[in-house]
Image (cartoon, grey):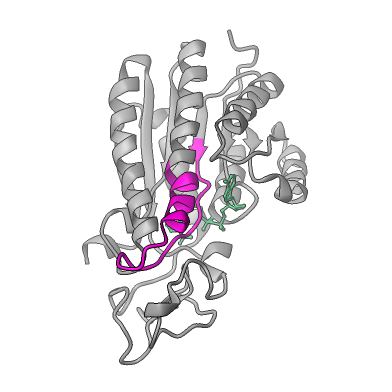
Amino acid sequence: PPTSTTRVALVTGAANGIGRTIALRLAADGLDIALNDLPTHLPALGALVAEIEGAGQRAVAVTGDVAQEADVRAMVEEAVSKLGRLDVMVANAGIPGGGSVMDADIAKWEKCWEVNIRGVLLCYKYAARQMVAQGEGGRIIGASSLCGQRGFARLGAYCISKAAVRSLTQTAALELREHGITVNAYAPGVIDTPMTRMPATAGLDRTHSAGIEAKQVRCFHGQCLAKFGLGLTKGGPQLLKLPADVRTGEPADVAALVAFLASRDANFMTGQTVSVDDGVHFS
Ligand code: NAD
């Protein structure tokens, strides 16, 4: 049985961007936080631990690769042994992945899937086991995307992985309903994070990149998609048709949704993938 009454969340990919902001938001909401990211990000996690503890909540860094089953099992065990229980899992870690279908480099596509869907599945698996053992319900939350709601040219590897998160979330929700565990996902549009600021290299298939502005760009006014280093140039290929007035969101916009999904108020809501994208997915 749990030894602590304070609710505990584990957030993966917490060293940067959306994950970092989710961790801070859940801590502000009174949860103790286990922070996961790759071992190379331990210094950033250490600083975040100090920030959260300075604000009065307990925090611990649990490094590991979410694509590795042994790592995920160990990070859940460590979180529980150090913080006493697990009530909320936020399977946030994800990486970009692109390239055309015709020239798909299977190894590269699988690398994206390893983190974005296998990683999320493993987080769901070990969180669910712990929550079922505790017998007090729980909240499992995964990272989907606007790219999981519809297809985008040359972003297939990523789109597939994020659509898979949406499907997995429904399956897990049905299986865990009887245990009082809800499973939901968030589907952000373009959010201002290190991922969307990365230089124009990630997974871009150069063979088909003619006309694509290959430089670091920001996504606003429908002109570009920085997430994968893809930009829409004048007269270039229409990779992403965003409405002219599309806006870039902030990590806090996503964290606010996750805070609700993690709360007791979201008790009657499960299997949902909730868009937080300024309406882009239906416009
Ligand atoms: P980010 O790149 O800024 O941060 C992601 C973090 O995940 C990094 O700290 C990275 O080190 C970590 N990570 C990567 N692989 C990992 C692994 N195997 N194990 C553990 N940690 C790992 O990304 P972000 O923009 O904050 O995105 C967070 C999530 O939201 C991702 O799943 C992303 O696909 C999704 N998302 C982001 C956007 C956006 O516009 N930023 C939009 C839709 C969905």
In the image, which residues are magenta? 90-117
Against 131, is 47 above or below? below
Q: Left or right: where does residue 10 sit relative to residue 160?
A: right
Q: Is residue 263 visible?
A: no
Is 114 included in the stretch rendered in magenta? yes
Q: Splitting the image into 4 quarters, where does residue 240 fall?
A: bottom left
Against 149, is 11 above or below? above
Residue at image position (64%, 34%) is 34
Q: Is residue 230 visible?
A: yes
Give the residue at the far left of this rendering: 282
Q: In the image shown, does 122 or 178 lie closer to the viewer?
A: 122
Q: Left or right: where does residue 38 sit relative to residue 89?
A: right
Q: Left or right: where does residue 58 sit relative to residue 226?
A: right
Against 124, is 167 above or below? below
Placement of the N terminus among the 4 image quadrants: top right
Residue at image position (39%, 30%) is 265
Against 45, is 125 above or below? above
User: In the rendering, at what x and y percent does residue 213 appear?
Assistant: 45, 85
Placement of the C terminus among the 4 image quadrants: bottom left
Q: Splitting the image into 4 quarters, where does residue 208 fall?
A: bottom left
Q: How many marks?
A: 0
Residue at image position (50%, 79%) is 217
User: In the rendering, at what x and y percent does residue 224 appear?
Assistant: 40, 78
User: In the rendering, at what x and y percent does residue 202 appear?
Assistant: 51, 67
Residue at image position (37%, 63%) is 104
Q: Left or right: where does residue 79 sit relative to residue 172?
A: right
Q: In the image shown, does 209 or 215 lie closer to the viewer?
A: 209
